[in-house]
Amino acid sequence: MNPVAWTWLAILAVSCVVWLIRHRQISHSRRACPPLHAGLYQDPCEDLPAVSLIVAAKDEHANIRTCLESLARQDHPKLQIIAVNDRSEDDTGRIIDELAETCARLRAVHVNHLRPGWFGKNNAMREGVSRATADWLCFTDADCEFTSPRLVQVAVRFAVEQGIDFRGN
């Protein structure tokens, strides 16, 4: 066999070994940290940190109602929902306003123009963050539906229990 073929065969073998080791590490870490599910933390918990959940939407009339209604059903005791209408040309803004009238936790924000040097979604998220009142921030997209009303509470309780956070300096 020529030396180039041996070299490629050695590279392939090393890559396979590295992949197998990494796969084993990932599999082991998943067993050490069981997946989250709605059955966790059945007891009510009022001492969770407050969360501001921010969703930016541009021309999302087909999705925004489902998204915001699923967020409004969340059982987290201290949840602020900020829906940012990012210059939509459809009914997105009207739907956000309509839902904000019926849900005290939902705040409607409308972006009519981009600030110099900013891009669309980044600017919309910045507008949402500037109105957030909670110490914890959660970002989602307008085409997401939180199918379990316990999703935010379970995730936050798990993060608190495990000491998981991100702090900028």
Image (spheres, rainbow, N blue to C red):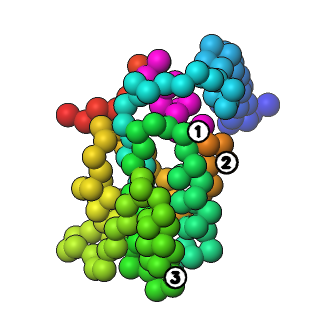
Look at mark 1 in the image and give the residue it sits on: 151
- Amino acid identity at mark 3: Asp
Determine contact: label 2, label 1, CB under 8 Å.
yes
Mark 3 surroundings: few (<14), some (14-19) or many (≥20) residues within 10 A: some
| SS at circle 1 | helix
The answer for how far apart the CA atoms under marks 2 and 3 are is 24 Å
- In magenta, the rendered stretch is 150-161
Q: Identify the residue at horizontal 57%, vertical 49% (top origin).
A: 73
Q: Position of residue 51 (x, y in %)?
A: 39, 41
Quarter where residue 135 is shown: top left
Residue on which disc 2 sits: 147
Q: Are marks 2 and 3 in contact (CB under 8 Å)?
A: no
**Residue 107: % across, % down:** 37, 61
Instruction: Report the label total.
Output: 3
User: Which residue is identified by label 3?
Assistant: 91
Residue 48, horizontal then vertical, whole percent? 41, 28
Residue 18 position in % (x across, y down) = 64, 23
Q: Secondary structure at mark 2?
A: loop
